[in-house]
């Protein structure tokens, strides 16, 4: 017991004793600094003994604080000193370095060969051709979005800025992203926080994301306001409308902007009161069934003047999406596009259980949506975007090969404007001014410089994509097919994506007998009049 007490309180006791015995000698030049130091430590020790929140500090006065100090800087120590180049937490050092280099126009070349174990299961690559194609102009890598019911189609780049709201991001971050989008001729998704003055400042193309809070077009009680929507949607800068059903970071959860981040500007932009948490409900109030959702899409298309209208979601219950597909057939109303968000996505904070254990990963969700539309002969009428941890040209190619028409990136563009992955987005203390409403902190983000980096990251990534396509004998991303990509499934076997996945043929889901068992079961469970399943399997 005595040794235990000694180990726990010895340092505290020494500080107190030194302070008391050195007080008479503080007139000496070399004594008083030590007396001051031990005096401060003694006061900390007394506070540690009296406080009731932390048992470690009560049992180890003064020394117990070291535990909390080290814990506080553990992420930084791990990221900068201990983390390997390929440790993805959530993005590896190699991934971040690639974005930083391309954003600074330094290229992404690496000497002395790959660090990746190419014989490890899960390794993926693109097969190259014995006769490479001529290098294409990456500025031509675009896709026209707008089905037969749309009168104002939009030509979108194959890489765009994914949804991030003003409020979650700072004003300067929004300015830099939109100015970069303008310079590079690609779109900037507003996120569900509505269209702020900073989105409009530089005139870059916008996709207005409409979440369950209907920010920017809501009534005082949070319902959808058609007149306010039409007033904003018909602005020429708004090129498409995207209904957010769910997001990869926290599907089915809704969202919250803490009240300490709700400034007067955010309050005006979103149409919400100050001094309260800004809540995005987990479900929409404007529709409650797949059929009503299709009718809402038609209404938004009409109110916007015929612009492309689609929706974004992270796949959950497969029969629910098939219920939406049945509603398309029943009503004849089609969305112009669908953005599939993977559970690996997420720029905002979310409960750990949602981050880790809810939602379908991007590729599985994307393949299911693509197959469903193909099986209903609707794929040529509806375009598909994909978002979820898209960083490199290979990331883009891997989703285009299994069904996407274009890709969106959120965290990639955050890195481009200076994010260092400090993972403090929800604290309002972002060290680089990206995810904060602190005016002093966001002043560190210099808009003209970061906007240039946004454009350069986009341009250099698509240039790398063009080089990969040329090596594979292709001239445009639309030519990518599952047979072009390869995955190692064991240390002795590799397979083409076309061998790994099930791909439906046009009209398969319209046949009396559906050959793919899983799709047959989900199709039989789906209902156009409800998101509930029609039967249990």
Image (tube, rainbow, N blue to C red):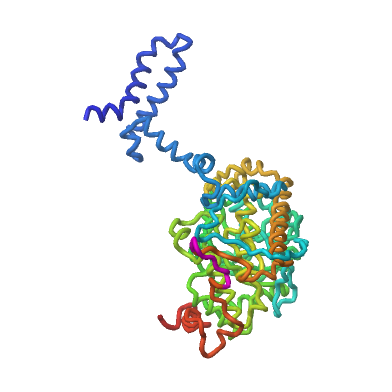
Q: Residue, x 52% and y 57% (percent of image)?
A: 119
Of residues 414 and 405, the one nearer the viewer is 405
Extreme residue in the left direction? 1
Of residues 117 and 430, the one nearer the viewer is 117
Please state, as top left, top right, bottom left or bottom right, where the N terminus lies in the image. top left
Q: Is residue 122 above or below residue 70?
A: below
Q: Is residue 186 above or below residue 434?
A: below
Using the rendered image of the protein, determine whether residue 231 is visible from the camera's viewpoint.
no
Of residues 92 and 408, the one nearer the viewer is 92
Of residues 234 and 121, the one nearer the viewer is 121
Extreme residue in the bottom direction? 512
Q: Is residue 126 magenta?
A: no
Q: Is 30 positioned to the left or the right of 329 in the image?
A: left
Which range is magenta?
490-498
Please state, as top left, top right, bottom left or bottom right, where the C terminus lies in the image. bottom left
> Percent from the top left, x then y, of residue 131?
73, 65
Report which quarter residue 161 is drawn in: bottom right
Report which quarter residue 310 is drawn in: bottom right
Q: Residue, x 57% and y 69% (percent of image)?
A: 497
> Percent from the top left, x then y, of residue 285?
54, 71
Q: Is residue 88 above or below residue 34?
A: below
Q: Is 197 positioned to the left or the right of 78 in the image?
A: right
Q: Residue, x 58% and y 72% (percent of image)?
A: 498
Q: Is residue 495 magenta?
A: yes
Q: Is 88 positioned to the left or the right of 103 in the image?
A: left
> Percent from the top left, x then y, of residue 474?
72, 67
Using the rendered image of the protein, determine whether residue 505 is visible from the camera's viewpoint.
yes
> Percent from the top left, x then y, of residue 390?
61, 59
Label total for image: 0
């Amino acid at each position: 017991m005595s040794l235990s007490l000694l180990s726990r309180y010895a340092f505290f006791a020494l500080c107190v004793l030194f302070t008391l015995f050195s007080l008479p000698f503080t007139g000496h030049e070399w004594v008083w600094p030590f007396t001051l130091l031990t005096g401060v430590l003694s006061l900390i020790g007394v506070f540690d003994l009296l406080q009731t929140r932390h048992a470690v500090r009560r049992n180890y006065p003064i020394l117990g604080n070291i535990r909390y100090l080290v814990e506080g800087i553990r992420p930084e120590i791990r990221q900068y000193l201990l983390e390997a180049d390929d440790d993805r937490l959530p993005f590896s050092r190699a991934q971040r370095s690639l974005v930083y280099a391309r954003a600074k126009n330094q290229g992404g070349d690496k000497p002395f060969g790959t660090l990746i174990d190419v014989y490890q299961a899960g390794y993926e690559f693109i097969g190259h051709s014995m006769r490479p194609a001529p290098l294409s102009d990456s500025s031509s890598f675009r896709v026209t979005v707008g089905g037969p019911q749309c009168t104002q189609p939009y030509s979108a780049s194959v890489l765009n800025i994914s949804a991030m709201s003003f409020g979650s991001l700072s004003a300067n971050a929004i300015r830099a992203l939109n100015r970069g989008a303008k310079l590079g001729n690609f779109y900037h998704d507003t996120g569900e926080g509505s269209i702020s003055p900073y989105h409009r400042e530089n005139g870059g193309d916008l996709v207005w994301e409409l979440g369950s809070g209907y920010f920017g077009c809501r009534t005082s009680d949070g319902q959808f306001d058609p007149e306010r929507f039409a007033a904003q949607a018909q602005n020429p800068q708004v090129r498409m409308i995207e209904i957010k059903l769910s997001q990869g970071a926290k599907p089915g959860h809704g969202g919250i902007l803490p009240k300490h981040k709700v400034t007067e500007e955010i309050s005006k932009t979103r149409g919400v009161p100050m001094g309260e948490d800004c809540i995005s409900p987990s479900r929409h109030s404007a529709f409650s069934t797949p059929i009503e959702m299709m009718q809402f899409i038609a209404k938004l298309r009409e109110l916007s003047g015929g612009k492309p209208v689609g929706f974004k979601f992270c796949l959950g219950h497969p029969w629910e999406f098939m219920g939406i597909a049945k509603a398309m057939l029943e009503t004849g109303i089609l969305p112009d596009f669908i953005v599939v968000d993977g559970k690996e996505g997420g720029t905002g904070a979310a409960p750990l259980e949602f981050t880790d254990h809810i939602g379908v990963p991007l590729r599985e969700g994307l393949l299911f949506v693509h197959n469903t539309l193909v099986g209903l002969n609707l794929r040529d009428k509806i375009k598909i975007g994909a978002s979820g941890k898209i960083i490199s040209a290979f990331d883009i190619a891997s989703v285009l090969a299994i069904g996407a028409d274009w890709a969106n990136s959120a965290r990639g563009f955050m890195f481009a404007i200076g994010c260092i992955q400090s993972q403090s987005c929800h604290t309002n203390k972002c060290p680089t001014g990206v995810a904060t409403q602190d005016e002093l902190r966001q002043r560190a983000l210099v808009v003209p410089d970061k906007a240039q980096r946004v454009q350069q990251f986009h341009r250099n990534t698509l240039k790398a994509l063009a080089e990969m396509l040329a090596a594979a004998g292709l001239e445009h991303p639309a030519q990518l097919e599952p047979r072009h990509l390869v995955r190692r499934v064991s240390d002795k076997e590799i397979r083409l994506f076309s061998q790994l996945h099930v791909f439906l043929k046009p009209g398969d889901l319209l046949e009396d007998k559906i050959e793919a068992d899983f799709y047959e079961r989900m199709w039989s469970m789906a209902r156009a009049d409800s998101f509930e399943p029609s039967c249990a399997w």
